Image (cartoon, rainbow, N blue to C red):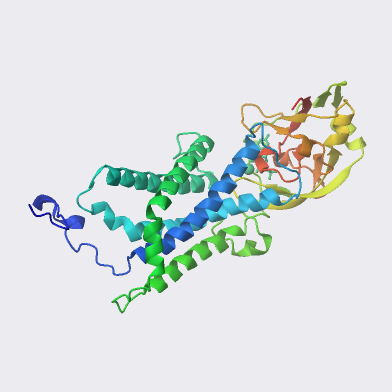
Amino acid sequence: MLRRPFPTPPAALRRGPFRRGAFTSALRSPRLTSHLGLLLAVAFGVCFLTGLLSHAIQHPPDWFWWPARPVWLYRVTQGLHVATGLASVPLLGAKLWSVYPKLFAWPPFRDLAHALERCSVLLLASTAIFQLVTGILNIARWYAPMPFGFVAAHHWTAWLAVGALLVHVAVKLPIVRRALSRTPRAVPTDGLSRRDLLAAVGATAAVVTVATVGQTVRPLRDLSVLAPRRPDTGPQGLPVNTSAAAARITVPADFRVTVTGPAGRHAFTVADLAALPQHTVSLPITCVEGWSADARWTGVRVRDLMAMVGFVDGSVLVESLQQDSPYRSSVLAPPHAHDDLTLLALRLNGEILHPDHGYPCRLIAPNRPGVLQTKWVTALTVVPS
Ligand SMILES: Nc1nc2c(c(=O)[nH]1)N[C@H]1C(S)=C(S)[C@@H](COP(=O)(O)O)O[C@H]1N2
Ligand SMILES: [Mo]
């Protein structure tokens, strides 16, 4: 029996996208798909690694160690995470456009290997879309469409995406090699050329980047029309993530900061803290959501406070007046706990801390995600590490 080289779907299905010649663009080619795929692989790779790093800093496994210097390192890695994620949106859109006619290829599965390969592509496309959508919802702080824990979902889906990506790269590498080594076939069109299309996609990614990266790259802030935050808006010239009202903070009249260590416990009023040697440091707040902003902080060195209760080594648990929030406490690992720049800050840019920035006192430490810069601090406790 003769096998037809291009099987066609049954007559009832030979319509719409299934009919022969349904997709007419001469721009689609393995070469275009390969170029877009390479760009996307680089963007996703950087996004994945910087994302893993951010996750490890916030949920450190035993073997993990993150330095306190340089003070700007997390600002760069998290800026890259959000910027590569956003630039991936037009890249992924174009890539999916370049291959989506394959969705209607007939037969849907030729054999088991083909079926598995198609499933891995489906997994890759859906996890990639999920990551970009949830990432954007998170930086927009719009949680209603996410009836699940963002952090866990975004983290575990990243592993699925990267697994599917590795399979995809392994399967397609020969095709990519062939497509990129051949001299490109001239496209028989007098409209857009393939080069124009790639340039347009690249330009869109560049515009998305320039229109958002000003949330962390200060000189570009005036161009930052698409960024959810500007680094210079908010009380005392600094954005606020959770306001004192949202965190339901009331500072009690007998407010104290309790400092506990191997040599005992001290309770400090705000006046006691202000009477201790004060230090001023310039450090950024770097939110995981991609914005960052520099500020001048004044307060007591955490190291000095902890020395009064016999702190020699270990970590420091920092606790807030705030209740019922995953951000109500954080841990200062040894590099940060011992760093000169780590303060229990009482002032921001010369003024008493605004309630939304953590009045009476907040933690500020170098090279640390914003979520770990605990506000409304009421207890510091040495913990073995
Ligand atoms: N207690 C407490 N501290 C907190 C938060 C919080 O929700 N509760 N938010 C954190 C986050 S996500 C960031 S980015 C910084 C922002 O500090 P800012 O509002 O002073 O700019 O505070 C951190 N400290
Ligand atoms: Mo944040």
Quarter of the picture for ligand 1? top right
Is residue 339 shown left or right of residue 157?
Answer: right
The residue shown at (47%, 49%) is 132
Is residue 296 shown left or right of residue 174?
Answer: right
Is residue 30 shown left or right of residue 55?
Answer: left
Residue 90, can we see it? no
Q: Is residue 301 above or below residue 280?
A: above
Q: Residue lying farthest left?
A: 1
Tell me where residue 288 appears, x and y as whole percent: 61, 45
Image quarter of residue 93: bottom left
Q: Residue lying farthest bottom?
A: 190
Tell me where residue 215 appears, x and y as whole percent: 62, 56
For the C terminus, which image quadrant?
top right
The residue shown at (76%, 42%) is 365
Image quarter of residue 184: bottom left
Front residue of this view, candidates 78 and 293: 78
Residue 214, can we see it? yes
Q: Is residue 296 above or below residue 272?
A: below
The residue shown at (51%, 58%) is 87
Is residue 98 shown left or right of residue 269?
Answer: left
Front residue of this view, candidates 46 and 356: 46
The residue shown at (84%, 42%) is 340
